[in-house]
Image (cartoon, rainbow, N blue to C red):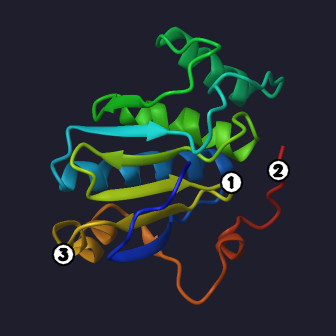
Amino acid sequence: MYSFPETIGSHILYAEAGSTQGLCNRVANGLTAMANARDYTHLYFMGDSGTPWLCRPHTYPPVTRALEYLMENGISETFNGVIKVDLTELPQFVKHLFWLVRCNGVTFAPHFTDESFNIIGNICQYGNIHISTLTTVADDGFNDVVLAAGLNFLEGMDCGASRINGRHFA
């Protein structure tokens, strides 16, 4: 059974972008910059159900590339576990994850955490990063890390309010 841990703070972060591809790149680079600023060596990505990562075939090119990327990196059609991603590979992984989440290429909401379980987060279909701090160490200086990573806090609006005008879901 899945249960969300007790949190210190919860935030929705967004990146400014004029296109979906630009948003994808900025989210990947922003999350990587945040992880680097906190000296994380890896992030761990997991689903919130027992469904395999590769259970849903897709025909949209960015999603098929993302599914191929996972298969090329050893993820089988029955794998439903945690994916450990080194920070050197994180930008590429997040770009593929972005498309999987955005276009329903996975049937669950992939969450991520660091090796010491200081944070837990996910990237939603709007391209926003939902992140919760789980320790006071992670919460201290969090605002500075976010802003230095080129991300912004979404305040006073719901998550979908930051979507790019004219953007349609595939």
Q: What residue lies at 58% left-to-right and 11% top-to-bottom?
A: 76
Residue bearing the label numbered 1: 125
Q: Tag 1 or tag 2, which sits nearer the N-term?
A: 1
Q: Tag 1 or tag 3, which sits nearer the N-term?
A: 1
Residue type, mark 2 in image: Phe
Q: Position of residue 68 (x, y in %)?
A: 62, 15
Q: Are marks 2 and 1 in contact (CB under 8 Å)?
A: yes
35 left or right of 94?
left
Residue 110, picture quadrant: top right
Vertical placement of 17 versus 99: above or below?
A: below
Q: Position of residue 35 (x, y in %)?
A: 27, 50
Residue 54, picture quadrant: top right
Q: Are marks 2 and 3 in contact (CB under 8 Å)?
A: no
The one of 160 and 164 positioned closer to us in this rendering: 160
Q: Tag 3 or tag 2, which sits nearer the N-term?
A: 3
Secondary-structure class at tag 1:
loop
**From mark 2 to mark 3, how far is it between C-alphas?**
36 Å
Q: Position of residue 48 (x, y in %)?
A: 58, 45
Q: Position of residue 138 (x, y in %)?
A: 22, 66
107 left or right of 8?
right
Task: Rate crowding at label 2 as few (under 14), some (14 to 19) or many (20 or more) other CA atoms within 10 Å.
Answer: few
The one of 105 and 116 positioned closer to us in this rendering: 116
Label ID, residue 113: none
Vertical placement of 163 versus 74: above or below?
A: below
Residue reaching furthest to the bottom = 156
Secondary-structure class at tag 3:
loop
Q: What residue lies at 69% left-to-right and 35% top-to-bottom?
A: 106
Label ID, residue 169: 2
Residue bearing the label numbered 3: 140
Residue type, mark 1 in image: Gln
Q: From the image, which quarter does the C terminus lie in? A: top right
